[in-house]
């Protein structure tokens, strides 16, 4: 029996799962927080999923390190959502290692100098590695 091809909705969900990786446990353990790794192109189609991730991060008791190193495109909506979430809780939502594309998007949206990006994770507490 032939398996039907995946629906467009199923394909879209698979792509979103590739773009957003969330580790709830401290990873690496010495970081004292969890990771949200973002990658690929983030645009209006990803805004709801990004908002859900950021709301979950805001309710966490420990810092969430957002790895932006794999972002290849960040539209104004996603950049604004990330920036405002960070500005509301800078100690709980720590932005790490932005790609040049992500950094350029934050700058274009007027957030230059308002977001402190950490090159490495442990820099968030002054000790060391992203």
Image (spheres, rainbow, N blue to C red):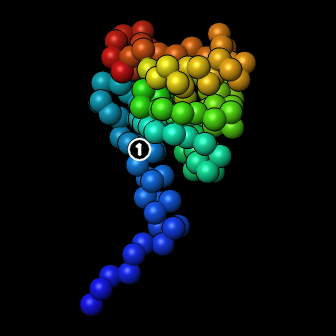
Helix, strand, or loop for circle 1? strand
33, 37: nearer the viewer: 37
Q: Which residue is drawn at 68% across and 33% down?
A: 76
Q: Mark 1 points at which residue?
A: 21
Does residue 19 appear to the left or right of 78 in the view shown?
left
Which quadrant would the C terminus be assigned to in this image? Answer: top left
| Quadrant of the rendered image containing residue 82 | top right
Residue 123, percent from left and from top: 42, 13
Determine if residue 114 is in view.
yes
Does residue 94 appear to the left or right of 23 in the view shown?
right
Toward the left, the furthest residue is: 1
Does residue 100 appear to the left or right of 120 in the view shown?
right
67, 45: nearer the viewer: 45
Q: Residue at x 44, y 37 (%)?
A: 39
Residue 120, percent from left and from top: 38, 16
Q: Which residue is drawn at 45% across and 45% down?
A: 19
């Amino acid at each position: 029996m032939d398996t039907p091809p995946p629906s467009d909705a199923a394909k879209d969900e698979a792509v979103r799962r590739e773009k957003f990786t969330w580790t709830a446990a401290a990873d690496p353990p010495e970081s004292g927080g969890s990771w949200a790794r973002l990658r690929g192109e983030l645009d209006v189609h990803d805004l709801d999923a990004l908002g859900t991730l950021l709301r979950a991060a805001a309710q966490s008791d420990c810092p969430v390190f957002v790895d932006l190193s794999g972002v290849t495109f960040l539209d104004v909506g996603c950049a604004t959502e990330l920036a405002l979430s960070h500005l509301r809780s800078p100690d709980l939502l720590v932005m790490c290692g932005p790609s040049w594309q992500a950094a350029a998007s934050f700058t274009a949206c007027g957030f230059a100098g308002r977001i402190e990006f950490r090159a490495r994770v442990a820099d968030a507490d002054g000790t060391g590695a992203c």
